[in-house]
Image (tube, rainbow, N blue to C red):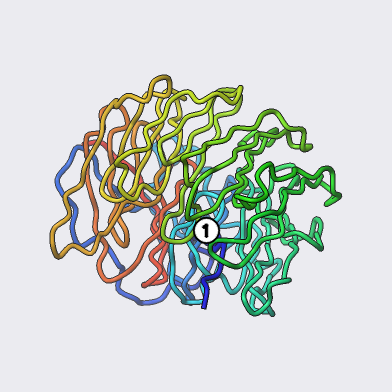
Amino acid sequence: MRKIFFTAIIAFLAIGLYAQDTAQVEPLPVQQQTGKVNLKVVYEKTFDEPIVDVIFDTATVSIEEAKKVGWKEGAFTEEEKAKGKVLISYPKVIFVSQGRELIWYGPARRSSYYTKEIRFYDRNGKIINRLSLKEFGEKYVYLSPQQKYILIAKIPTEWAPGYSGGILYDIDGNKIWEIEGPTPIAVSDECYAVAAYLDWQIPPKPGGDFYVYDSKGKLLRTIENPMKEKTAPLFAEYSKDGEYAILVFAMPTFPPTELILITKAGKIIWKKELSKYRFTPHRGSNEEIDILPYKVIGLSGGIIIDWEGNLKWERTSNWGGIRGCTFSQNEQNFYIYGANRLYSLNIDNGKNIWEHTQHWDSEDKVLKFVEMFEIHQYIGIKGHPNKIFIFESKTGKLKTEVEYSDTQIFLTQYNGHIFVIDTGHKKILGLKIEEE
């Protein structure tokens, strides 16, 4: 039986909801190595079901109200205490796990292989909408770059090869549009979308095009496959400003790869063929692309392309299972991570600024680096399945690491805090980085 193609669903590292606290023993770290920073728990909630991702919002509330929804005394500054008011993060949307295998799938699809229900809340923790995904067919969830919209994509399988289309919702659970035909696989914060007729097989059948839709779900343009005998529509992603999207025609098992940069309305800016490059954004490889608008586009396999479509530099050899990438906040570095290595590369020439290799113990459960973000002057990265590493972004120095026992975790960051989603203990912890 051939494997399902395009496996990927967001599962968004879920943070706590306004659920009743239970008497469970807290899944606190079992080990924290001495370092120059500490991770202080400043938020905590326990739930009745495992949640695998979250979309946050913010609200200004009293200190007493903040404590009622899970924030601890250590979260507040002296100035906030004096004012009696504080800006807090709260879960606007949570994603409930089906309890199946949980894998990280990159920024748009994130951590959950399956989500059984999406719950939408107001700032007081009241459920205002529910969306069940347990109906017929395989469904994946994608988020817009700033997490303003939620896309439910219908994915074909061997048993339902014609199953396709998708529905877009806002973060209150309101339906924005529905596409019947190709399956949308990327959406912008202005509700533009890119779709394709997906093939369930690996490798997929060659051929197929991309389709660009406007904010009303109306078809704007078809982007034809320039290599119909060799590639299939495989991946799409919008820039964070929503003005552009990168399209990938490829095979996950062999080269070539064709990249096309388009405007949000589907106008082609350039095409770039990578004749020896194999782009593989599926389960087990999960390659990523990051877009720095008007500057460069980076592939986690070690390629940077400038905004005119020229190959700026390439470092494709000896990456050894690399999974993800992101540009630094100062737009000068390109981070690549995966397996047991983390690189900071110069955007202009690809040279190492620094690199870190993690030597796992023979009995260590941590298999590889997945999930990475930059927060303040630090880099947070997860060691699958249950470790957090904090690095200094300028030097790559490991500042501290934390291990969680007998569980699997996911990470996210919002409003200056790291949030740990402890799927095994149904708990969310908010962490604050404190210097010693």
- The residue at 38%/58% (across/down) is 429
Which residue corresponds to the image point at 43% horizontal and 69% vertical from the top-left?
Answer: 46
State left or right for residue 131 relative to residue 367. Answer: right
Q: Residue 418 location, x and y as percent?
A: 40, 48
Residue 78 placed where, x, y %?
A: 39, 37
Number of numbered discs present? 1
In the rendered image, is residue 45 in sight? yes
In this rendering, would 361 be left or right of 285?
left
Q: Residues within 10 Å of mark 1 (few under 14, many from 20)?
A: many
Answer yes or no: is residue 85 visible.
no
Q: In this rendering, is residue 201 above or below 299?
A: below
Q: Residue 151: image x %, image y %?
A: 68, 57
Q: Quadrant of the C terminus?
A: top left
Q: Please, what is the three-letter code of the amino acid marked with disc 1?
A: Phe
Q: Is residue 33 left or right of residue 100?
A: left
The image quarter containing residue 347 is top left
The spot of residue 200 in percent (x, y) is 61, 67
Which residue in the structure is indicated by mark 1? 12
